[in-house]
């Protein structure tokens, strides 16, 4: 979490930093700050969002052609002015921005305090910059050398950028476990947590790897590893444009991303799927497709919404490939002693490709000899780089903290993988294989049709915006959708919501149902239709209020439910792609009506790069 941005060039740094911080705000938004150089280090920082910093700085743009900026998601120390970044070294000669956690900062802080260093914040970051200052002084060495020595002694994760009062022509950047990208312009350089602050200035970028340090001056950029060995920078071209990271007329990124789904799913299938010709090509996993076909077991690792996509994938793999699948929370997997054997297949699902728990779980699986595959959205992200192979989502940048279009793109990619393997294994009939290919191709049109219910969903939202609890029920392929609907609602509207397999209700949650409990039932016409009707009746018998997502033309459920939202008919294996959309809209409207910040919900950040 936390967003970092830095600039060195001929232009004024402040507007570039502010613009970049606004783009990175999805990564954390509890405090913001910049450091500039105008004869000496000038630091402006404030608790709150980037606009609070702008108001604090005022109309007059502080002059400087070098600067660093930070938007924070607090880990060490409450959100406050004094805990905001940038932080200065004790002697005020160095300023730093940091994304990550220095785990051994307590011991370092004690040593420095014993030497007389004073600290003005509760952060690990302030300790790190004073540690660097101390090493520089003790060893009488260059800043670059001091950074290198300090980083070889710290434990934890970091993406840092440092500037010095003594040198207004140099930035030092380094990373380990937290993302960092360097933009190379004409006579100017940019550093950021992701490419969004850079895209409008240059498309030439370098993704810094773990344990690498970049020394950026006005005329040069050099990269070394932590052992001081010079490396050749690898410049790549960004495959992204400005329009993709702007709201495009929508009030919120979340709404834009919900409405983008017909296109993002089509983009995800483009060049891979041609149902008429019966073609399904996934170049990204060609090397290991044989291993997938022959695998005896697959482990899926993910967090949050991506974990829900993993659950749908479990059902798909088991149904069509007859391969047993375990879906693991990355945060649990990494701290167990999981049974992973040489050659096992582990698939990581991640929108950002930077989730710390998923990354660590993958590293663990890799160390045990597993083949690791990625289903990732962010191109060039850490997870996409450590996996042996993978398939990108191609859904475009997802900015809203609540994941929407990434979920449906994940389902699309996972379905394509499953169908490819099932066809190779011969565990699916040719007829069904072709039927599912055509169905998949028709999903964008079906989602367009669901989006037409937006006004009706807004109306329903208004009736339930003050509810204190919500239950979401589904069966089979729609059970993970119930979990996803509940997560969407709680993360952006702060209403307590729980998702359950509908039949589990009688083992506990049914006790919650009374006339005040809205129950969203995903009750599309599928193999468990009769069963879910019984579950609806159980809810109604206890005076619960049923909001049912049903297949168009259903005549039975509308007679029992209080409200229905129709979705087009679809094969049950692909229904989650369609049935999740009304739930995304429901949570969006409820959150908005409750006055919540839809794109930047409290306590959350888009990329969870700390454990
Ligand atoms: O970037 P990732 O897919 O790895 O992120 C995983 C979760 O942090 C993420 O899905 C989170 O649960 C979302 N806020 C859900 O909307």
Image: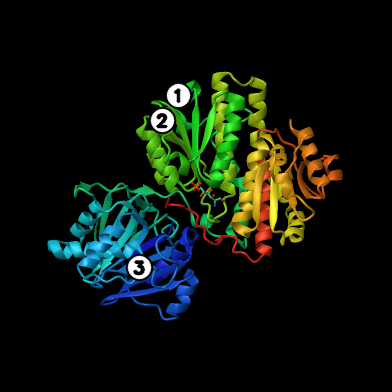
Q: Secondary structure at mark 2?
A: strand
On the rendered structure, is 536 left or right of 188? right
The image shows residue 277, relative to residue 401, as above or below, that is above
Residue 603 image offset from top left, x and y in percent: 52, 60
Quadrant location of residue 250?
Answer: bottom right
Residue 577 in the image: x percent, y percent?
A: 64, 41
Answer with the quarter of the image where residue 43 lies. Answer: bottom left
Residue 371, numbered circle: 2
Residue at disc 1, secondary structure:
helix
Sort mark 3 into few (<14), some (14-19) or many (20+) by Cα contacts within 10 Å.
Answer: many
**Residue depicted at x 41% and y 70%:** 15
Q: Which residue bears the numbered disc 3?
A: 86
Q: Earlier in the sequence, mark 3 or mark 2?
A: 3
Which of 300/452 is in front? 300
Instruction: Tell me: 53 left or right of 446.
Output: left
Give the distance between the C-alpha atoms of the residues marked 1 and 2, in whole angstroms: 9 Å
Instruction: Give the colour scheme of this rendering.
Output: rainbow
Asked if disc 1 and disc 2 are in contact, CB closer than 8 Å, the reply is yes
Residue placed under numbered mark 1 in the picture = 291
């Amino acid at each position: 979490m936390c967003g970092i941005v830095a600039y060195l060039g001929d232009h004024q740094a402040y507007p570039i930093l502010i613009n970049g911080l606004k783009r990175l705000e999805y990564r954390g938004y509890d405090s913001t700050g910049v450091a500039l150089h105008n004869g000496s280090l000038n630091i402006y920082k404030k608790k709150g969002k980037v606009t609070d910093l702008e108001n604090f700085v005022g109309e007059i743009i502080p002059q400087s052609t070098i600067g660093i900026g930070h938007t924070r998601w607090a880990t060490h120390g409450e959100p406050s002015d004094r805990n905001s970044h940038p932080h200065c070294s004790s002697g005020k000669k160095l300023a730093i921005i940091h994304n990550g956690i220095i785990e051994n900062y307590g011991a370092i802080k004690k040593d420095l305090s014993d030497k007389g260093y004073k600290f003005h914040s509760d952060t690990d970051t302030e300790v790190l910059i004073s540690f660097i200052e101390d090493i520089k002084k003790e060893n009488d060495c260059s800043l670059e050398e001091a950074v290198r020595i300090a980083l070889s002694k710290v434990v934890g994760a970091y993406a840092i950028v440092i500037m010095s009062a003594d040198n207004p022509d140099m930035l030092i950047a380094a990373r380990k476990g937290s993302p960092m990208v360097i933009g190379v312009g004409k006579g100017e350089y940019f550093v950021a947590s992701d490419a969004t602050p850079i895209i409008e200035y240059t498309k030439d970028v370098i993704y810094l790897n773990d344990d690498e340090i970049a020394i950026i001056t006005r005329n040069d950029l050099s990269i070394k590893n932590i052992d001081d060995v010079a490396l050749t920078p690898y410049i790549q071209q960004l495959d992204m444009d400005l329009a993709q990271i702007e709201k495009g007329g929508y009030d919120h990124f979340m709404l834009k991303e919900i409405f983008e789904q017909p296109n993002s799913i089509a983009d995800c299938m483009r060049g891979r799927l041609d149902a008429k010709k019966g073609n399904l090509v996934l170049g990204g996993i060609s090397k290991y497709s044989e291993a997938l076909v022959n695998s005896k077991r697959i482990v899926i690792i993910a967090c949050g919404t991506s974990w829900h996509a993993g659950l749908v994938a479990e059902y798909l793999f088991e149904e069509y490939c007859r391969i047993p699948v375990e879906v693991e929370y990355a945060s649990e997997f990494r701290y167990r002693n999981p049974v992973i054997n040489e050659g096992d297949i582990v698939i990581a699902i991640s929108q950002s490709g930077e989730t710390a728990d998923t990354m660590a779980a993958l590293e663990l699986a890799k160390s045990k000899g597993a083949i690791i595959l990625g289903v990732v959205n962010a191109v060039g992200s850490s997870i996409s780089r450590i996996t042996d192979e993978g398939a990108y989502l191609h859904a475009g940048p997802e900015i809203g903290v609540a994941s929407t279009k990434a979920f449906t793109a994940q389902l699309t990619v996972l379905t394509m993988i499953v169908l490819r393997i099932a066809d190779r294994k011969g565990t699916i009939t040719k007829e069904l294989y072709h039927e599912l290919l055509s169905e998949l191709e028709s999903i964008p049109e079906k989602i367009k049709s669901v989006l037409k219910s937006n006004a009706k969903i807004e109306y329903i939202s208004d009736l339930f915006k003050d509810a204190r609890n919500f239950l979401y029920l589904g069966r089979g392929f729609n059970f993970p959708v119930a979990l996803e609907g509940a997560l969407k609602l709680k993360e952006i509207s702060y209403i307590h919501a729980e998702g359950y397999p509908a039949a589990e209700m009688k083992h506990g949650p049914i006790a919650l149902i009374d006339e005040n409990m809205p129950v969203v039932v995903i009750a599309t016409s599928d193999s468990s239709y009769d069963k879910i009707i019984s579950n609806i009746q159980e809810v109604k018998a206890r005076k619960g209020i049923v909001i049912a997502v049903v297949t168009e033309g259903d005549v039975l459920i509308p007679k029992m439910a209080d409200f229905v939202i129709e979705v087009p008919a679809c094969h049950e294996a692909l229904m989650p792609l369609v049935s999740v959309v009304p739930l995304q809209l429901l949570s969006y409207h409820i959150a908005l009506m409750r006055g919540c910040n839809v794109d930047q919900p409290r306590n959350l950040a888009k990329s969870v790069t700390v454990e």
